[in-house]
Image (cartoon, rainbow, N blue to C red):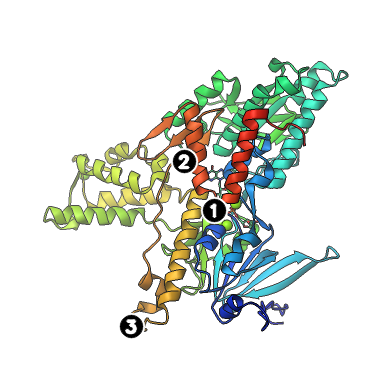
Amino acid sequence: RGGPKNLPIAEVFIDEDECEEKKRIKHKPRLVVLGGGWGGVALLKELNAEDYHITVISPTNYFLFTPMLPSATVGTLELRSLVEPIRRIISRVHGHFIRARAEDIEFSDKLVEVSQLDHQGKEVRFYVPYDKLVIAVGSVTNPHGVKGLENAFFLKDIDDARKIRNRVIHNLELACLPTTPDDERKRLLSFVVCGGGPTGVEFAAELYDLLNEDLTRHFPRLLRNEISVHLIQSRSHILNTYDETVSKYAEDRFSRDQVEVLTNSRVKEVRPDKIIFTQKQEDGKLTTKELPVGFCLWSTGVSQTAFCQRLAKKLASFQTNRHALETDTHLRLNGTPLGDVYAIGDCSTVQNNVADHIITFLRTLAWKRGQNPETLHLHFSDWRQVAMDVKKRFPQAVNHLKRLDKLFAEFDKDQSGTLDFGELRELLNQIDSKLTSLPATAQRAHQQGNYLAHKFNKMARLSDGLSANDIRDGDLDAAVYKAFEYHHLGSLAYIGNSAVFDLGDGWSLAGGLWAVYAWRSVYFAQSVSFRTRSLMAMDWAKRGVFGRDTDL
Ligand code: FAD
Ligand code: MG
Ligand code: MG
Ligand code: MG
Ligand code: MG
């Protein structure tokens, strides 16, 4: 027992009769990973096997391949094909798995407080000690303070997908009963998706495909025109973080497919039989509307887990972001001793350094011209250069920076046609404060996990050989490895038998069936194991031959 709360401390023992590999890691630094999702698994996949004594703590014992989750809800893919047991993943690094939830961290004692329900269903708590800790606990669905969400479905994990699948099929079955009155049938067959981001859009598209491709075969009694799919979006466009051409393509596609897209609309309440929302009219007035609903999916973005909120509060003077844990560019949690605690994936954000980046760019520009940066006057053409550079480096910001050209005019207070240093500084401040941080995507979590793994491998290799002089201010991370840099590889969303791509940099593609295959192959390559890949390939082949499984 020990620590501030005097809880049991769980030391993971390695007995004398364990295998040789395990005995070798016995005295290695203890690396504890919280979460077995995209970030955690990317880390575990790349770590060298015998450098650390690894423990993974997570309430779920499998990794979930989330990009395919929308397809699993309607039976395009089998649920088991989307998961990979954590124990299988960590066996390569001889790691331990503790199925429990992290509740708190004692940073000065280097202890994670975890909870689990015991055999009697009673909560037990204990500490797990660490030398290095990686927080990769992901995010939770954002309720936006809306009433009645207990009547809605979410799409975060495999249980959610199973529930959705059962409900959709059940509604179809009820609608088929000869005793179901007409208006009740219409309600049962009204499917509403709240949220016009990639998850909502992909789910609506998958659902539409199911209803069109397989329904007539399995439910011949149902009339296609009694079924309706609606998508409610608070912004003026769906997929609004994507390039404009992409969101336009998606909207056109949906209107052709008779998926009703309700933009500028905010859900107020989800009742068991109807949804109440307000829609902003052209004249700016709000009108309250209702939709009968048989099934409602709530997918309006993510927010911070209770655990991360607790940590942020604890480190309040270093943590100012309300949505994510802030790290430095080496992914170390701000406010904790250097090299102890890292945060990656959805739960984290790297502190913005766009302004720094632009300043570096301007220094180079001034240097090329043989000028002093302080006296540099920036012409519009220079600004375009800066803007393009920023868009390339921070593609997730493109949406916020669409108006970069206008900003120039706005900040050229004396209308001289150039920006002086003071005007520029004001502009940069505005950009920094407006910019959303890194996107909450598998792509980003994966890159961060990989980055940490390579760094930890290198640290283990070098730490013995380095002298204190090599390590400035005890900053081993910076001494051995470069800062994290995010590479945007493009976003993808699936819209009914076609996929839209947003490759950043103003490139976007939207296409027919070929795009579906390109889309699949991207995720194929990212998929974690040959086992998972084979299972998915079999599912797709099966669907091609036999159609979807609509029961089960
Ligand atoms: P997760 O992958 O969510 O992993 C979090 C892990 O932490 C889980 O194992 C969880 O059980 C565990 N955990 C939670 N709380 C605790 C705790 N207190 N203590 C210990 N462990 C805890 N991204 C894309 O790039 N492309 C896509 O096409 C895409 N499609 C998506 C579709 C859906 C339906 C969803 C839900 C997400 C999609 N995403 C996509 C987003 C992507 O899944 C996330 O960005 C990614 O999972 C983030 O990785 P992570 O490691 O931060 O968190
Ligand atoms: Mg993770
Ligand atoms: Mg995951
Ligand atoms: Mg995370
Ligand atoms: Mg000026």
Q: What residue lies at 62% left-to-right and 39% top-to-bottom? A: 538
Looking at the rendered structure, the kind of residue marked 3 is: Asn
45 relative to 501, above or below: below
Q: What residue lies at 48% left-to-right and 48% top-to-bottom? A: 439
Q: Are marks 2 and 3 in contact (CB under 8 Å)?
A: no
| Secondary structure beneath label 2 | strand
- What mark, if any, has residue 469 been given in the picture? 3
- What mark, if any, has residue 346 been given in the picture? 1
Marked residue nearer the N-terminal end (2 or 3): 3
- What mark, if any, has residue 491 been given in the picture? 2
Marked residue nearer the N-terminal end (2 or 1): 1
Marks 3/1: CA–CA distance: 36 Å
- What mark, if any, has residue 507 been given in the picture? none
Is residue 471 at all visible to an observer of this figure? yes
Q: Are marks 2 and 1 in contact (CB under 8 Å)?
A: no
| Image quadrant assignment for residue 175 | top right
Q: Where's residue 155, x and y in %? A: 66, 42
| Image quadrant assignment for residue 207 | top right
Q: What residue lies at 62% left-to-right and 46% top-to-bottom? A: 142
Of circles 2 and 1, the one toward us is 2
Nearer the observer, 397 or 278: 397
The quarter of the picture where the C terminus appears is top right
Marks 2/1: CA–CA distance: 16 Å
Nearer the observer, 170 or 6: 170
